[in-house]
Image (cartoon, rainbow, N blue to C red):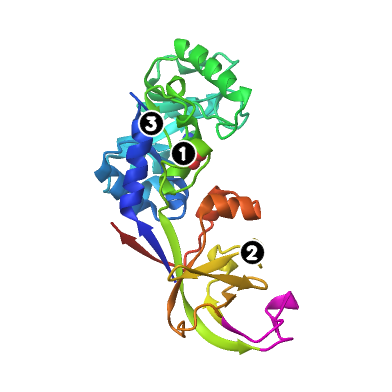
Amino acid sequence: MRLVLDGGALAANWRALDGLSGRAAAGAAVKADGYGLGAREVVARLAAAGCRDFFVAHWAEAQALAGLVDPARIAVLHGIAPGEEAVALAAGAVPVLNSAQQIARWRAMGGGTCHVMIDTGMSRLGLDWRDDVAGHCAGLDIDLCLSHLASADEDSAQNGAQRLRFDQVRTGVTARRYSLANSAGISLGHGYHFDCTRPGLALYGGVPVAALADVIQPVMRIETRVLQVRKVQAGDSVGYGATFTASHEMRTATLSLGYADGFKRALSSLGGFVKDGIRLPLLGRVSMDLTCIDISAAPDLGEGDWISADLVLPQAEAATGISQYEWLTQIGRRFDRVWVD
Ligand SMILES: *Cc1c(COP(=O)(O)O)cnc(C)c1O
């Protein structure tokens, strides 16, 4: 099995999002191993395209990028938990401080340049915008002052409300740069861009809002091989639970790919594969490591041949209710990652 990753599309997506960010510079969210595609390869390619700011969640994710980019441009979104002080100092990446306690911990460690997250209405991470944010931040050397939009992918009044709150907080917090927008937030317009934007999903080919549909190119393609070709007769059933029964004789192929690889069981009976432009539908349930398809329309397909999953992220989300974020980040570890540029 292989993930075919289009480095040209990744770079083009970043350039498009950077362009849409106006005067702001687009960074890149590369947490969760670059949304499942491989953080080191993603970061190397985005850095070559001109991207300067990278966002990870954990210190180990920052360390995994060692030697690729200046650690001062890697932001660790979860900040510093008790006991992480030494790891944080060794990594040299910059913590995003989320609470008064994290700020105190950073000061006790000797401080230095940091980022600060403000919660403007998501009630998840960051200093509450209603608190004395200016007081908490006084004396800190803040590079980025950030907040995160809860509903950027929807036409929601919450976006404007969060922007207004962020603007208010900004007046009391001195930082070198300010940042609010994720992928979807970029399409909300210049009022949301500030100095730095933080796209993730759209870099990797996800389309969070219709406005980005014509701008974003797919980056990832799943390919696998035919393990076995069979002749299924009328009345035979296929797979666990016998959810598909053949009404006539058909050629089927059993593929090396299953839900343990992130090819979700929710695709059972819905998904398909493509060979030379011909769509080959999935039969019955997706198993842990195997999937069966109808190859009657591709008579030349044989054992050992490669075939592509017909998996387009926004469509997969619409068909299964599983978000594009989950599709990407739950791609299994068993794939060979093959980058083409
Ligand atoms: C993950 C994340 C992003 C990227 O969001 P997308 O919706 O994937 O573009 C930006 N900012 C923060 C704080 C994040 O956690």
Residue at 74% across / 78% down in the picture?
242
Near mark 2 (Cα within 10 A), the count class, few <14, some 14-19 or many ≥20, is some
Amino acid tagged 2: Leu
Disc 3 under 8 Å from ligand 1? The reply is no
Q: Which mark is residue 63?
A: none
Residue at 53% across / 19% down in the picture?
163
Near mark 3 (Cα within 10 A), the count class, few <14, some 14-19 or many ≥20, is many
Whether residue 246 appears in magenta in the rendering, the answer is yes
Question: How many marks on residues?
Answer: 3
Task: Check whether the beta carbons of the residues at disc 3 and disc 1 lie within 8 A of each other.
Answer: no
Q: Quadrant of the N terminus?
A: bottom left
Residue that badge 1 annotates: 212
Camera sees residue 135: no
Q: Which mark is residue 270?
A: 2
Residue that badge 3 annotates: 20
Upstream in sequence: badge 2 or badge 1: 1
Disc 1 under 8 Å from ligand 1? The reply is no
Disc 3 to disc 2, how far (Cα)?
Answer: 35 Å
Disc 3 to disc 1, how far (Cα)?
Answer: 10 Å
From which residue to which does the magenta span run? 233-252
| Secondary structure found at label 1 | helix
Residue at 65% across / 61% down in the picture?
266
Amino acid tagged 3: Leu
| Secondary structure found at label 3 | helix
Amino acid tagged 1: Leu
Q: Quadrant of the C terminus?
A: bottom left
Near mark 1 (Cα within 10 A), the count class, few <14, some 14-19 or many ≥20, is some
Q: Is residue 221 left or right of residue 150?
A: left
